[in-house]
């Protein structure tokens, strides 16, 4: 497991960090985005969507299960906040979002066991009102090199 940690001092900076990661993504890639309410999950996904050519508004799909946008590639944005687990029927409603799209999943914990293997897992944490710690974990170190230019820190024991 390779991981990268960065501090963001503004929503715009979080969008820019997401944009760099997004440029290395392709349809079929799934990115999990975790963090408490207000941590910046939707802000991160918005930055990624912009970099992938999505032009319209990118808002939290809290009251629907997801949005599917078309940019230079299709981008799905799911929010599993209201779920505890998934029945087969609920999962089959979700499956089309994964078809030929880059997929971002907020509150992915409910999808453990049914979500496809993610390309990256992003975790956002509050540090101060405008400061967030952003942790990116991936099993693919080249993704971090491409998207951050950083030499990924190797975590032992994972
Ligand atoms: N460094 C930062 N990164 C991301 N969001 C920030 C940052 N500083 C302040 N914010 C604000 O925090 C809020 C994050 O909201 P949102 O992205 O909807 O969070 P979530 O989807 O995790 O609930 C926004 O109002 C955003 O402007
Ligand atoms: Mg959100």
Image (cartoon, helix red, strand yellow):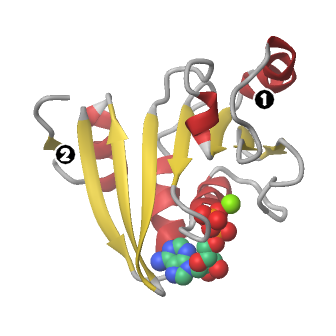
Residue 15 sits above or below residue 127 on the image: above
- Viewer can see residue 12: no
- The residue to which callout 2 is attached is 152
Q: Of all residues shown, which one is farthest toward the front?
A: 84
Residue behind mark 1: 97
Is residue 74 depicted above or below 113 in this figure? below
Left or right: residue 93 versus residue 42 is right
**What element does badge 1 sit on?**
helix
Residue 33 versus residue 22: which sits nearer the camera?
Answer: 33
- Secondary structure found at label 2: loop
Using a 10 Å C-alpha cutoff, classify the residue at mark 2 as few (fewer than 14 neighbours), some (14 to 19) or many (20 or more).
many
Toward the viewer: 108 or 23?
Answer: 108
Q: Residue at x 59, y 60 (%)?
A: 41
The quarter of the picture where residue 103 lies is top right
> Which part of the image, by quadrant, shows the C terminus?
top left
Q: Is mark 1 within 8 Å of ligand 2?
A: no
Residue at 63% over, 42% down: 104
């Amino acid at each position: 497991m390779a991981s990268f940690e960065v501090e963001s001092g503004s929503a715009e900076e979080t969008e820019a960090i997401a944009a760099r990661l997004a440029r290395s993504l392709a349809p079929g890639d799934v990115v999990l985005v975790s963090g408490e309410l207000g941590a910046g999950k939707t802000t991160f996904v918005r930055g990624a969507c912009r970099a992938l050519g999505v032009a319209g508004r990118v808002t939290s799909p809290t009251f629907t299960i997801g949005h599917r946008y078309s940019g230079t590639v299709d981008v799905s944005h799911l929010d599993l906040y209201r779920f505890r687990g998934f029945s087969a029927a609920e999962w089959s409603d979700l499956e089309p979002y994964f078809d030929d799209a880059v997929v971002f999943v907020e509150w992915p914990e409910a999808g453990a066991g049914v979500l496809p293997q993610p390309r990256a897992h992003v975790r956002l944490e509050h540090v101060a009102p405008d400061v967030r710690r952003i942790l990116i974990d991936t099993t693919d170190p080249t993704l971090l090199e491409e998207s951050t230019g950083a030499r990924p820190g190797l975590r032992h024991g994972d």
